[in-house]
């Protein structure tokens, strides 16, 4: 009798184990909870924007969970401070991405993205990334937050041509990139250069400098000697702010128009060198300045979870909320399709291609993710630092496709 | 037992020898190595210009390999949760599975010196809390093959300042 009982128990146990093995999705979504892994920089040289971006995601997810989750699924936020170190980020990826409850992730480093691409090839795992156009050229796991770097550069080329005409100048203006000496610093010209040349703009050799550079005089002086009219500045705030500090001191801001890419002056830069930043133009795929700080959703989330006045909000907070909105929409779509207990990273990946046109309440343009697009959106706005504030000078503008102009 | 012939036992021995040889060959081919260059270092600003390097072997060709440091229970590093290893460097192996890589300045600053960072994005040496001297275990892991290797890196006390 005892022997038969034992056999039955063992058989039942084996059946249960078999069921678990055959339905991994059920095991992955414990209590209908999934996780989002954020390999970010809460400290270090890019923390000025990376930290508010991450807390924007975290607060948005807190808000969703406080309201019961999305389609019955709660989203656990896992934030890892990688301190702008790719080795640490790679090590953290190795440790955390093994957890099957992690259904999507975000990274803030272009060089890391290029490294992870090789490791994650063939998987279906959403990884949200800054703006590397290579991920649009080779469709896979990596989903830029907004338009690609080269598309934003191309939109800036159009803005420059208009500005040149408005100023009544003849001939072709020249532009040069001044940015970090890494994969990110070179990315915007991979397609962006082709677009500029197509439009008749002279692209001068880039000036690239190491991250953490203290003084920019040597690069700025070389650009001035080359006869540049427009300088497209990369880096992460306060890099652009410090460049403007030096350009202003050298008297270069009178004759050269400085334009920052996405990661330039925010409330952080304004708090450091407001006078030097005066007149700088910023191309942005997310709301900036008082437009962001007074946005109803951002204001509510910020004051609820950070308990600080809206003026203290860095605009990258809205960028993070934009990432959160897309993530929640993808999880919602997946939960509706397969059920809240079967939300796996593969299902979130499928759904992330299915949220085309998703509105993000005007914080970021409509979502452009689809089976053939990895662009987070296809619109940018231009802002200008005026009277110590970052104010819009255009409405949302559709970005040209510069990615397809590059030979990948 | 008596029923089995000498020929049978001979054949069993041959098969066993062949299996053992095969296993030994595989084990040798799979042997991985990791060494820090130099394997002893004092923490000094010179490490930014001449960082610690790592040499590893026995991994897959063109494989990304991660080099991490194991933290003893009494050593805490800013932002690294207890029980986690800290990534020091990474790189891609050559066609023979050999790796040569070095620590990036950010890794040296963050994990060896444990600096703070100013709002202007500059390392703040006033907040530095250098890693205590000691012999630290280091691991290399092939991110595709999963192969691992172990080595050591000794942090020694800086030489006394000359008066």
Image: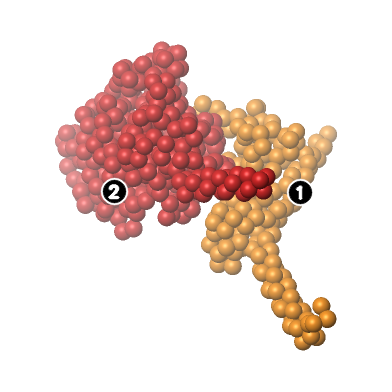
Chain colours: A red, B orange
Closer-to-camera residue (A59/A73): A73
The residue located at (78%, 41%) in the rendering is B134
Location of residue A235 by image quarter: top left
Residue B157 visible to the viewer: yes
Q: Is residue B152 depicted above or below A59 in this figure?
A: below
Q: Along the horizontal axis of the image, is B155 left or right of B124?
A: right
For label 1, the residue is B40
Residue A379 appears at what percent x and percent y? Answer: 25, 36
Closer-to-camera residue (A368/B3): B3
**Whole-Å distance between the Cαs marked 1 and 2?**
52 Å
Describe the element under mark 2 as helix, strand or loop.
loop
Quadrant of image for the C terminus of chain A: bottom left
Residue A129 visible to the viewer: no
Q: Residues within 10 Å of mark 2 (few under 14, many from 20)?
A: some
Q: Mark 1 and mark 2, same subunit?
A: no
The residue located at (74%, 79%) in the rendering is B12
Residue A332 appears at what percent x and percent y? Answer: 34, 33
For label 2, the residue is A371
Q: Is residue A51 depicted above or below A148 in this figure?
A: above
Residue A163 appears at what percent x and percent y? Answer: 21, 35
Q: Mark 2 lies on which chain?
A: A
């Amino acid at each position: 009798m005892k022997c038969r009982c034992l056999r039955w128990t063992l058989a039942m146990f084996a059946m249960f184990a078999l069921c678990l093995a055959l339905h991994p999705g059920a095991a992955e979504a414990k209590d209908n909870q999934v996780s989002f892994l954020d390999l970010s920089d809460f400290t270090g040289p890019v923390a000025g924007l990376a930290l508010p971006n991450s807390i924007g995601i975290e607060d948005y997810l807190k808000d969703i969970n406080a309201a019961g989750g999305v389609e019955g699924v709660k989203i656990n936020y896992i934030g890892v401070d990688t301190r702008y170190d790719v080795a640490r980020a790679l090590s953290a990826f190795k440790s955390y991405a093994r957890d099957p409850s992690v259904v999507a992730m975000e990274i803030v480093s272009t060089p890391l993205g290029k490294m992870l691409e090789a490791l994650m090839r063939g998987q279906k795992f959403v990884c949200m990334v800054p703006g590397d156009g290579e991920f649009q050229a080779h469709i896979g796991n990596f989903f830029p937050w907004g338009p690609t770097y080269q598309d934003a550069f191309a939109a800036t080329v159009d803005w420059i041509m208009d500005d040149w005409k408005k100023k009544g100048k003849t001939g072709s203006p020249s532009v040069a990139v001044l940015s970090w000496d890494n994969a990110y610093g070179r990315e915007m010209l991979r397609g962006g250069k082709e677009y500029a040349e197509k439009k008749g703009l002279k692209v001068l050799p880039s000036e690239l400098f190491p991250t953490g550079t203290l003084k920019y005089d040597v690069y700025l002086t070389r650009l001035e000697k080359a006869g540049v009219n427009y300088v497209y500045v990369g880096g992460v705030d306060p890099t652009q702010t410090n460049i403007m500090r030096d350009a202003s001191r050298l008297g270069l801001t009178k004759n050269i128009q400085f334009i920052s890419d996405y990661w330039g002056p925010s409330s952080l830069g304004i708090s450091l060198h407001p006078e030097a930043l005066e007149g700088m133009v910023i191309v942005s795929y997310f709301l900036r300045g008082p437009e962001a700080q007074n946005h109803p959703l951002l204001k509510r989330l910020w004051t609820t979870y950070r308990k600080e006045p809206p003026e203290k909000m860095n605009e990258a907070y809205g960028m993070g909320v934009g990432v959160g909105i897309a993530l929640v929409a993808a999880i919602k779509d997946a939960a509706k399709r397969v059920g809240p207990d079967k939300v796996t990273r593969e299902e979130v990946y499928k759904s992330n291609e299915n949220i085309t046109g998703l509105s993000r309440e005007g914080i970021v343009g409509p979502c452009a993710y689809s089976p053939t697009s990895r662009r987070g959106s296809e619109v940018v706005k231009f802002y200008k630092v005026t009277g110590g504030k970052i104010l819009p000078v255009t409405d949302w503008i559709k970005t040209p496709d510069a990615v397809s102009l590059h030979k990948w | 037992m008596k029923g089995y012939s000498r020929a049978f036992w001979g054949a069993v021995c041959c098969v066993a020898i062949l299996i053992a040889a095969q296993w030994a060959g595989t084990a040798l081919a799979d042997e991985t190595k990791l060494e820090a260059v130099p394997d002893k270092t004092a923490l000094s600003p010179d490490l930014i210009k001449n960082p610690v390097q790592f040499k590893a072997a026995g991994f897959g060709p063109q494989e990304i390999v991660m080099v991490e440091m194991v933290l003893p229970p009494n050593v805490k590093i800013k932002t690294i949760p207890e029980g986690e290893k800290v990534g020091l460097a990474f790189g891609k192996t050559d066609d023979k599975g050999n790796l040569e890589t070095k620590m990036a300045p950010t890794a040296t600053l963050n994990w060896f010196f444990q600096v703070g960072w100013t709002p202007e994005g500059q390392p703040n040496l006033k907040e530095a809390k250098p890693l205590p001297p000691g012999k630290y275990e280091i691991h290399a892991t092939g991110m595709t093959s999963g192969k691992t290797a172990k080595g050591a890196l000794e942090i020694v006390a800086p030489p006394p300042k000359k008066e």
